Amino acid sequence: MPLKFEIKHRSGEHAGRTGVVTTPHGSFKTPAFMPVGTRGTVKGLTPAQIESTGSEIILNNAYHLMLRPGDEQIAQLGGVHAFMRWNRPILTDSGGYQAWSMADINTVDEDGVTFKSIIDGSKIRITPERSIEIQNNLGADIIMAFDDCPSSVAPQTQNLARRRHALTKRDGELSVLEHETRLLQSLDRTARWLERCANFHQRPDQQALFGIVQGGTNLDLRSRSVEQVCNVELPGYAIGGVAVGESPEKISEVVKFTANLLPDKKPRYLMGVGYERDLVTAVASGMDMFDCVLPTRNGRNGQAFTRKGQIHLRNAFYKADTSVIEEGCSCASCSGGFSRAYLRHLFMSKEMLSGILVSQHNIHHFQSLMIDIRLAIEDNSWSALPQRWPVLLSP
Amino acid sequence: MPLKFEIKHRSGEHAGRTGVVTTPHGSFKTPAFMPVGTRGTVKGLTPAQIESTGSEIILNNAYHLMLRPGDEQIAQLGGVHAFMRWNRPILTDSGGYQAWSMADINTVDEDGVTFKSIIDGSKIRITPERSIEIQNNLGADIIMAFDDCPSSVAPQTQNLARRRHALTKRDGELSVLEHETRLLQSLDRTARWLERCANFHQRPDQQALFGIVQGGTNLDLRSRSVEQVCNVELPGYAIGGVAVGESPEKISEVVKFTANLLPDKKPRYLMGVGYERDLVTAVASGMDMFDCVLPTRNGRNGQAFTRKGQIHLRNAFYKADTSVIEEGCSCASCSGGFSRAYLRHLFMSKEMLSGILVSQHNIHHFQSLMIDIRLAIEDNSWSALPQRWPVLLSP
């Protein structure tokens, strides 16, 4: 098996657990937060700087790397670990989400998805087999099944939302029914595609394939999807299609319901989530792995995470503020003594170093939260978490 | 005295020497190369990364920091060392060069220069006194005199070049004469301004003021300028107004002539120069300090310096090149194993990390050259330099 998951502690208060996942490129502690390194780089950070945030595993996007420099190119260069000089665990997504959310035009049929390249407009086709081939070429430790996720992705969601809005004026029932029908078709297709992914996988000894549960906010569909996906024996399972615009309460409900249905002994990965409170809630529901662009994307925009909430460093309020982002923080930015006034200056001057220093802090912030989450599970002090993380209580 | 210069070795082959300059923020070895940190940041690099290139002193631009965040703001924040978290020597230029070269509109009179802010178009006035006030506020270890440099700066040079071209068609003699007359007026004004700078300087115990010799490519004018500038007793002297479009031979001739006239016991700083060969020639003429944007600016554009010459990393030739920029190089990029193929990918993907990794290499390249230059002076092996630096021989 390319992946070993040991559960170390179980909370006495909820479904949360701590553990260690071991891959061909080393181990990472769970619950784990994975920063996003879209194009084979966590924007602006060297691998040493990523390590200094406490990150033990990162995520790369198969879609972006397939388009440029190309998955075969990366295979020839020795795989994505050697390519980007990150010798710890890597997870790649399947490209499905990006194919749907980023492509100008896409069509989906039983065999796969066709879309226009964001680089040169050329026609690209991804099937379940091609997605696995891409990920086999990239060589990440954990790879993801290619799924059909129309209900949870931007353009189709938007189209659907527009259509639903139009229909609702005429007949609300019909539009909801149509939506449910589409979701059901999509789930069944996802199940068929998962079989094809698992059958095509060329490197099952080096790369752990995770299945993805879909179903939107409909718990019956989530239940059906779990049954279908877990019918294929895999090293881990993920929950997809959440945090695409629902309320935190809805996310929490769906995750709690779905996590409870997933096999206990396999790592559970909640895709694309989220804010601190979302993570804490999901961990308490039994989720083990997370990825999110928030710390890096917000960091480049001048938003720094603190235990009391985000601060906007472009604000003139910080012009003469000699304090660091967060007093007592051990990240490279805060321990390096870079003041809010200096960071503001860098943002106002559009200097690269601004995003670099704040991304480092923000990723470190999420990794510190994961450390405290793991401790709180190990010593059953869950309810004390908000004392050190007041942001968990903010409205 | 805010600055101590000890000459350690003198070449037995030419006018070059090695030494150590000691400032209130520590020492740096000479000949020294200073990377440019325009807005209080060497673009994309943390202070730790700058240190890892072997740099012991950096340059900041008074003009940019005066406009944003403002020199008084930086003074309130404890000065530019504390502001950018670089606790080693810093040199600031006077703002004169930028006022001339970057401002949309500027007028110069006996009292100073008026120009439009590049940030908000507001009218800014810099006099010799204001330039020193700005630099006193910023608090660098070495500060530069505010000089009148019409012959050596972009817009006026271009205007002059256009006018000369037009005049040359009618009367070449007249245009040259006019040019010489302007230069002479400019030199005399520079001399008067230097007196004002020295008289106004509020922190002579913490900050070493350097005078600047101008005079273009006319050796008589250079000689006159040296006499005027060195008439004011200062901790160091600089040669300005070179590397603004002349041939390497012309630069070499002017620098050799001028350096020889400068006081032997004071550090000599050649402003804005240059390529490896220019530096080597200038050191052999007795120059001690250099700054140049080449390693960082070219680094961000995908041009990497090697001992055999620059390589253009965007070139498709490097698509599958697993070698680092320069075999055996100990910079963070090469010793980190980042391949040319990966760097090319980062440039093609417009990823920040590209410029960061190549800037680190390029600055390290220039610092390695300075190390070898110092060794070659100390053991009189000057002629062997090109063996390790073939770029010095390239046409």
Image: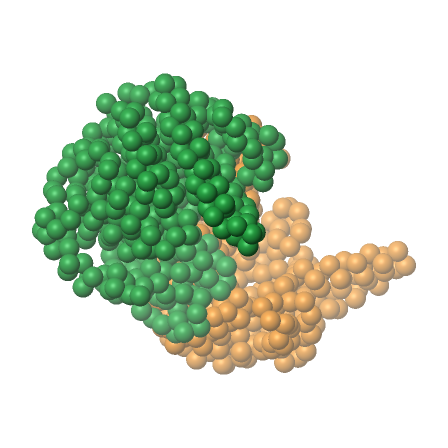
Chain colours: A green, B orange
Q: Residue at x 59, y 65 (%)?
A: B98
What residue is at 53 percent from the left and 78 percent from the top? B130
Is A50 displayed left or right of A97 in the figure?
A: left
Residue A38 position within the rendered picture, expressed as x and y whole percent measured from the top left? 43, 40
- Name the residue rendered at 67%, 51% in the picture: B246
Instruction: Describe residue B278's horizontal placement relative to residue A72 as left or right.
Output: right
Residue located 60% across and 67% down the image: B118
Using the image, determine if residue B218 lies above or below residue B301.
below
Quadrant of the image containing the N terminus of chain B:
bottom left
Q: Give how far across and how far down residue A215 sits, in percent.
A: 37, 40
In front: B273, or A121? A121
Give percent across and percent down for residue A24: 26, 27
Place of residue B202 in the rendered image (x, y in percent of width and height, measured from the top left): 43, 80
Of residues A264 and A272, the one nearer the viewer is A264
Say if residue A359 shows up in the picture. Answer: no
Q: Quadrant of residue B272?
A: bottom right
Q: Is there any visible trace of residue B122 in the rendered image? A: yes
Task: Classify residue A220 by image quadrant.
Answer: top left
Q: Is residue B186 left or right of residue A230?
A: right
Image quadrant where one finds the C terminus of chain B: top right
Q: How many marks?
A: 0
